[in-house]
Amino acid sequence: TRTPVTVTVTGAAGQIGYALLFRIASGALLGPDVPVKLRLLEIPQAVKAAEGTAMELDDCAFPLLSGVEIFDDAKKAFAGTNVALLVGARPRTKGMERGDLLEANGGIFKPQGEAINAGAADDVKILVVGNPANTNALIAQQHAPDVPAERFTAMTRLDHNRAIAQVAKKAGVAVTDIKKLTIWGNHSATQYPDLFHAEIAGKNAAETVNDRDWLENDFIPTVAKRGAAIIEARGASSAASAASAAIDHVHTWVNGTADGDWTSMAVVSDGSYGVPEGLISSFPVTTKDGKWEIVQGLEIDEFSRGRIDASVAELSEERDAVRKLGLV
Ligand code: NAI
């Protein structure tokens, strides 16, 4: 039998945590033959709730789950971890300015970056889900100088999956017919879901749909504002779909993208497509043997250029704001 992979989940008692932990324990994160050890990190007030979830995990008798530990100390929670899912974050509350939000999250992601730096396993892979995800990932990464920067990623897979679902519905095809979709930029309302490089059943997606009005005025805003639409309908933010996307992100990273396809991940920019080096921005990426690569050589027309630049400008502003706060 294989040695278990240690997976740390922060915000474990939250709504995404509740949807995520059972799927990790069932083998969906890494594969059906990989045993996992779960480490849950919560704030002290939520440890009891995390213990309740751990009781339920026990009660599932998952064959692949080789243990659950609960912590309120980041150093302990990340010691020896192979996969770190940073879900817990400070939500924006009424009257909170963006600067306050970034600062409050800096207070979470700086010490977590330091803890990962101090004690995570050499092969650690980090996915930041907690918002503002790209900039939280940047803060953590900047405080983990001994961890290769490419191990820090932020989640745009939910946006990617949402976009696939919308195109499949529009074209009347299966989601599996949609390939090479890209989310560019920030996980925010400025994100750019790109159909110009995507394919529907092997043909160019934008040409196949052939409905520019829908693409610009329906598809893009529907994907970008889907989070708000879910809150409006459910009375709570996306949780199961976010958890499912987190599973997909790590599964793809570890197990690879299929030939002829790619995925969307927010990763540290090397300057590709004019995105300033060091920003954690979403790109089309392929993965193989646990490593990602940005897809190179795509032709970017004026429309796409404008959309990418707008979202990347927002990321630069967020980086400037956390710089001013001394967080990066
Ligand atoms: P939630 O409020 O239900 O749960 C968050 C949990 O994090 C709480 O249990 C809280 O106690 C915990 N927490 C807070 N600070 C912590 C710390 N320092 N260490 C450990 N745990 C801590 O929120 P929910 O719905 O689970 O969402 C979590 C985050 O994911 C939010 O920031 C949300 O905006 C974000 N999100 C991101 C998406 C994406 O696509 N990137 C999609 C959906 C949500």
Image (cartoon, rainbow, N blue to C red):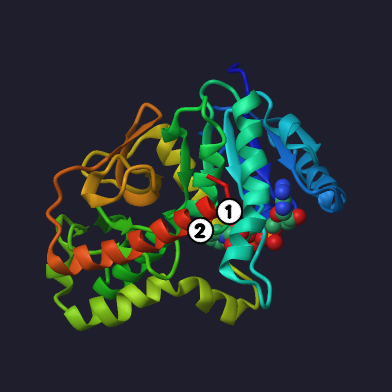
* Circle 1 residue: 325
Q: In which quarter of the image is the N terminus?
A: top right
Instruction: Count all numbered tags in the image, as a single digit.
Output: 2
Q: Label 2's element? A: helix
The image shows residue 307 at horizontal and vertical percentages of 26, 67
Q: Residue at x 25, y 81 (%)?
A: 214
SS state under label 1: loop
* Structural crowding at the residue carrying mark 2, measured as other residues with C-alpha within 10 Å and reported as few (<14), some (14–19) or many (≥20): some
Badge 1 local density, few (<14 within 10 Å), some, or many (20+)? some
Residue 169, compared with residue 133, is above or below; it is below
User: Whole-Å distance between the Cαs marked 1 and 2?
Assistant: 7 Å
> How far across and down, in percent of the image, does residue 2 sit?
58, 18
Cβ of disc 2 within 8 Å of ligand 1?
no
Q: Kindly identify the amino acid type of the residue bearing the numbered disc 1.
A: Leu
- Horizontal side of 251 relative to 302 (left or right) equals right
State the residue in front, 88 or 244: 88
> Is residue 51 placed above or below 119 in the rendered structure?
below
Above-or-below relation of 179 to 271: below
Q: Do the residues labelled 1 and 2 touch (CB within 8 Å)?
A: yes
Which numbered marker is on residue 321?
Answer: 2
Q: Is residue 279 left or right of residue 113?
A: left
In the image, taking residue 319 as reference, residue 196 lies left or right, namely left
Q: Name which residue lies at 62% across and 43% down.
A: 110
Residue appearing at x 39%, y 47% in the figure: 279
Q: Quadrant of ligand 1?
A: bottom right
Residue 299 falls in image quadrant = bottom left
Q: Nearer the viewer, residue 93 or 84?
A: 93
